[in-house]
Image: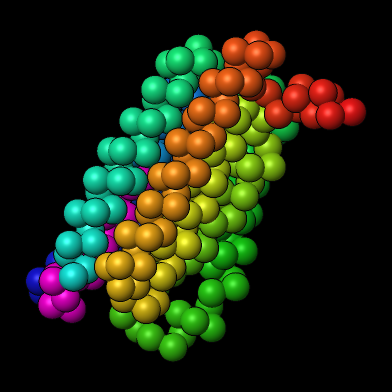
Amino acid sequence: MTESLFAQTVATATGLLMLTAVLQVWRRSTDASTKLLAIQGAALALLVGAIGLAEGHAELVLIAFVVLAFKAVALPWALARTIERSGIHREDSPAVNPVSGLLAAAGLATLAYAVSRPLVALDTGPAAHAVPAGLTLVLVGFLVLLTRHRAVSQVIGFLVIDNGIATVAFLTAGGVPLVVELGVLLDVVLVVFILRILSARLELAHGEVDLHDLRELHD
């Protein structure tokens, strides 16, 4: 892969990662959020594959296919089945409205770029310049966790954070060994499937999977 093609691929992949993260804050539809998560997983796989081809690491190319299978297919499918079973297709009462959410996401992106400037200054390559995008994903994921009440939305926020951490790892250190990456992905899959089962049982028992309302049961 030529340097110019690598730079264009990294720019495209990180652009998709940031766009899908910001749209997660704007969209209230859980179905749309799941589709955005699938696109985000595919963009992460594209980024990993590009790094592997540019550096000549066959293991990274293999990891790219693993990331594609899990983050772009398996996890969104599991979330889609959970949404279909629960019948909750919309986040009705987020803590912030879409406009405020977009402004907050823009502020977090600015913060990510400011914080990562020393790291970007160490390397002039396209991979280093894309690190702020990964940090933005992490911050936006926390924003989703803090502003959404549905259990499915909370899972989506958690997965956005995981994608952001993975993005920073691949851009700064060339990723992690295949065995470690498989272990992390399996842990994430296990968490999602457990939350899927719990959400279904909560819906069956209480007719609601809104964390705000469920806290009243504790009180």
Image position, residue 158 (x, y; %): 54, 46
Residue 16 lies, with reference to residue 130, above or below; the image says above
Residue at 60% x, 73% y is 115
State yes or no: residue 96 in magenta.
no
The residue lying furthest to the right in this view is: 219
Q: Quadrant of the C terminus?
A: top right
Q: Main secondary structure of the magenta part?
A: helix
Residue at 44 percent of width and 52 percent of height: 187
Q: Tell me if residue 215 comes above or below residue 37 in the rendering.
A: above
Which segment did they paint magenta? Answer: 40-58
Total marks drawn?
0
Find residue 7 and report its image quarter. bottom left
Could you say where residue 88 lies in the image, as x and y percent from the top left?
A: 54, 16
Is residue 3 among the parts visible in the rendering? Answer: no
Q: Nearer the viewer, residue 117 or 47?
A: 47
Question: Along the horizontal axis of the image, is 26 left or right of 20?
Answer: right
Q: Tell me if residue 193 comes above or below residue 113 in the rendering.
A: above
Q: How is the image coloured?
A: rainbow
Could you tell me which residue is drawn at 50 percent across and 44 percent down?
191
177 w.r.t. 187: above or below: below
Q: For the view shown, which residue lies furthest in the bottom direction?
A: 122
Q: Is residue 122 visible?
A: yes
The answer to if 53 sits in the magenta stretch is yes
From the viewer's side, name the closer residue of 182 and 118: 182
The quarter of the rendered structure image containing the N terminus is: bottom left
Residue 171 x, y percent position in the rendering: 36, 72
* Residue at horizontal 46 percent and vertical 21 percent from the top: 83
* Of the pair 90 and 68, the residue shown nearer to us: 68
Residue 32 screen position, x and y as percent? 42, 26
